[in-house]
Amino acid sequence: KNQVEQSPQSLIILEGKNCTLQCNYTVSPFSNLRWYKQDTGRGPVSLTIMTFSENTKSNGRYTATLDADTKQSSLHITASQLSDSASYICVVSDRGSTLGRLYFGRGTQLTVWP
Amino acid sequence: EADIYQTPRYLVIGTGKKITLECSQTMGHDKMYWYQQDPGMELHLIHYSYGVNSTEKGDLSSESTVSRIRTEHFPLTLESARPSHTSQYLCASSVPGNQETQYFGPGTRLLVL
């Protein structure tokens, strides 16, 4: 069964600290993996996308890694800011259909305290 | 920033009422989607469209219907709202491709009493 599992479910850190969010998936075949940021009351916004051949992708203070062999990804946030408080969603796309079906994780709820 | 809009943002309505959630995008994207999201849960695809006059049901069974008469407009309708329809509804659009990025609207939070 194609699934995307994220951990931890929630995380609280102090402003300025680093953190790492995890994503494990069983989706096959695999096309790409995205990390989205969803602020409370808003729609998700894409942070990074990685294909099979990419193992690191950065977007400012966000760095995503991908290990396609172990089917694991991580999102590292450096020097966290209050505005980083949001839900971070891991999304995996297969290549087995014309729709390019997306499998969503439940997200990690990150809270950054001052 | 994506130009995709949803109205209303919040809606409280009584059981049995007919409602239409609006979604519009100004990016000229052919593909559009409706997702349902409950707190702390993953997004579930309920409807999608490849373009004008194309509508398909998604993975999650839904009593809602959609239409796609114009490229930029993809409204979702509930003929008779029930408390079980209480949820957040997210609209998205994308350009077809191997790495297509979906751009999401801000969502509509629906509460059915």
Image (spheres, coloured by chain):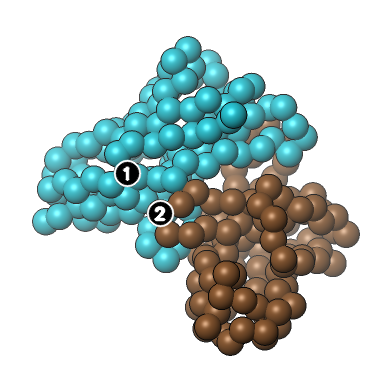
Judge if badges 1 and 2 mark residues of a common chain.
no
- Quarter of the image for residue B18 reads bottom right
Circle 2 is placed at which residue position?
A: B40
User: Which residue is rendered at x = 59% and y = 29% of the image?
Assistant: A1
The local secondary structure at tag 1 comes to loop
Q: Is residue A90 left or right of residue B8?
A: left
Give yes or no for contact between labels 1 and 2 (Cβ–Cβ under 8 Å).
yes
Q: Colour of chain A?
A: cyan
In this rendering, the answer to whether A57 lies above or below B6 is: above
Residue type of the residue flagged with mark 2: Gly
- Quarter of the image for residue B20 reads bottom right
* Chain of the residue that carries numbered disc 1 in the rendered image: A
User: Is residue B64 in view from this perspective?
Assistant: yes
Q: Position of residue A62 (x, y in %)?
A: 33, 37
In the rendered image, the residue lying farthest to the right is B53
Q: Colour of chain B?
A: brown
User: Is residue B26 in view from this perspective?
Assistant: no
* Chain of the residue that carries numbered disc 2 in the rendered image: B
User: Which residue is rendered at x = 23% and y = 53% of the image?
Assistant: A111
* Mark 2: few/some/many CA within 10 Å (<14, 14-19, 20+): some
Label 1 to label 2: alpha-carbon separation: 9 Å
Q: Position of residue A91 (x, y in %)?
A: 51, 38
| Image disc number at residue A9 | 1
Q: Position of residue A67 (x, y in %)?
A: 43, 17
Residue type of the residue flagged with mark 1: Gln
Quarter of the image with the C terminus of chain A is: bottom left
